[in-house]
Amino acid sequence: MYALIDCNNFYASCERVFQPHLNNKPIVVLSNNDGCVIARSNEAKKYIPMGAPAFKFKSVFEEHQITVFSSNYPLYGDMSNRVMALLGEFTPDLEIYSIDEAFLNLFGFEHLDMLEYGNQIKKRIEKSTGLPISVGIAPTKSLSKAANKIAKKFPVKTGGVYVIENEEKRIKALKWLKAEDIWGIGRRLTDRLKAVGVNTAYEFTQLSDYWVKKHLTVTGLRLKRDLSGISTIKTEELNSKKNIAVTRTFSKNLTEYKDIKERVVTFAVTCSEKLRIQNSACNSLLVFLHTNQHRKDLDQYARNVVVKLPFPTNSAIELAKFADMGLKQIFKNGFQYKKAGVIASDFTPAEQIQLSLFQNSNPKHKSLMKAVDFLNARNGGKLIKLGSQNPKKTWIMNQEQLSPRYTTDLNEIITVKAE
């Protein structure tokens, strides 16, 4: 059996944990630079569509007294870590699927009452973190996804926990689940399924293996079998990323090379940190730069360049140098730049780097980067930076509605007043 745990309206729920007076009131959370709506409480969903541009809905926010928050990623990340750590107490085989979702492999737990076990998980998470969750349990991963949707859709009837433990419940669930809501089926595949009269997950499972493999590839065939109750999609280990991208929209237009260089160097440093976390080194950097495409009144310019590195590295010092080399190739005076980014790719495992006859990464950087990572992690921030970075600036976003980082910054810890 598999369990899928999903935190309900995660970002909005994180805000409510520390501001309980907002329970049962509409809340939305905005994206970087307060651009668009990326999370909504149930109360806000009837007024605000997902992805709505914030500036266009200001009057709606005011009319319906919707509380608006800027994205507080340090808080959300820490709350996610707490949830995942607690879920690890319920199984040794945990797959973190996203910041607010995880699969639990319950193989060997068949002697337990699955409904009771699901309720134990729900009670433990909600009591320890204050976050509401939904639990779906079924014989396969894709069916646990379906079970979770049912638990979330009918919270009063299910209590937030639903188990598909027999064939009758499996068929009933799949007849209820729409084709477009099948895990892994996107818009293009949905259109292809509807073209042959498939509107539900159950109808999808009735297609021939030959048709599914031909039109939806082997991945679609695995999904069909998984939905049919044959465990085909196994719990996966956390894989290293194939590329690492750090891109940002500037809070204002930038025209000076030195200002853009500081941002690009910072992006390269962040890439280096992520590379070291997954114990990789990169052989290639893509650096891009462009103006605001929505400002038709301004001259437009967009360029990118791929910098092939002479050796694989995850050193912040070396990647910053190569990123600056790339920026010099594409920067042009006379434009107002709005966005830039650095993408690291072509990875090599850090322990498998082969030395070259002519150029190699500075071996002293390995111990230096280890010390920098340790000090930054211990102090909860970017304490140590390169000289080419702004010591007072990490990344300035428009965050007019930012809540405190209650759990990650001692200066913003919640204050309790006892009377």
Image (cartoon, rainbow, N blue to C red):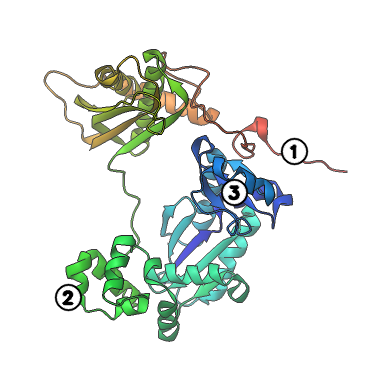
Which comes sooner in the sequence, label 1 or label 2? 2
Marks 2, 3: nearer the viewer: 3
Q: Quadrant of residue 142?
A: bottom left
Q: Which residue is mark 3?
A: 28
The amino acid beneath tag 3 is Val
Closer to the camera in the image, 381 or 188: 188
Q: Secondary structure at mark 2?
A: helix
Q: Secondary structure at mark 1?
A: loop
Q: Which residue is mark 1?
A: 415
Query: Residue 419, how many percent across, how many down?
Result: 88, 43
Residue 392 higher or lower than 379, as above or below: above
Residue name at image x 36 percent, y 19 percent: 335
Which comes sooner in the sequence, label 3 or label 1? 3
Q: Which residue is mark 2?
A: 210
Which comes sooner in the sequence, label 2 or label 3? 3
Residue name at image x 37 percent, y 76 percent: 200
Residue 102 higher or lower than 231, as above or below: above
Closer to the camera in the image, 24 or 233: 24
Query: Residue 309, how many percent across, how many down?
Result: 20, 25
